[in-house]
Image (cartoon, helix red, strand yellow):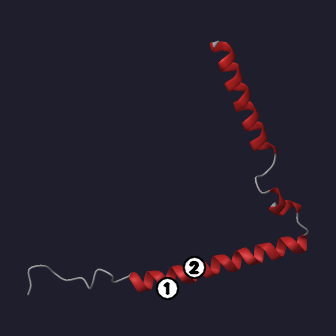
Amino acid sequence: MKASLFSFVAAAALLVTTAASAAPFDHDRDLRRLSPRERARVEQAQRERERQQAIERTRWEAKHRHDRGPARSYGHH
């Protein structure tokens, strides 16, 4: 009983790992399968997205830089 259960678990694990390594999850968007023009377009869009995220992050940090108020020395009224 234990041997057959172990055999089933081992077979299932082997099947899952083989399927996972066979192809990328999103193989339609694999950059290696795109034409050079399409790859350049996708990479440009990714750079633009990253640039926009950096701008938004900088804006958020500037807005929240002094959320705790200005630094004050304690003990002074």
Mark with earlier residue (1, 2)? 2
How crowded pointer 2 is (Cα within 10 Å; few <14, some 14-19, many 20+) is rated as: few
Measuring from the top left, give residue 10's x and y in whole percent: 69, 25
Image position of 76 (left or right of 43): left
Q: Is residue 29 above or below residue 46?
A: above
- Labels 1 & 2 near each other (Cβ < 8 A): no
Specify the farthest residue to the front.
1
Query: Where's residue 35, x and y in %?
Result: 91, 68
In the current view of this chain or complex, which residue is farthest to the right? 35
Is 10 left or right of 60, judged from the image as shown? right
Indicate the quadrant where residue 9 lies.
Answer: top right
Residue under the image location 76 percent in, 33 percent down: 15
User: Residue at (74%, 77%) from the top-left corner?
Assistant: 45
x and y percent of residue 18 in the render? 77, 37
Disc 1 on helix, strand or loop?
A: helix
From this view, report whether residue 19 is shown above or below residue 62: above
Residue type, mark 1 in image: Arg
Q: Which residue is mark 2?
A: 54
Give the residue number, with chain letter if any, for mark 1. 59
Point 69% across, 16% down: residue: 4
Say above or below: 30 vs 36: above
Q: What is the three-letter code of the residue carrying label 2? A: Ala
Viewer-proximal residue among 11 and 60: 11
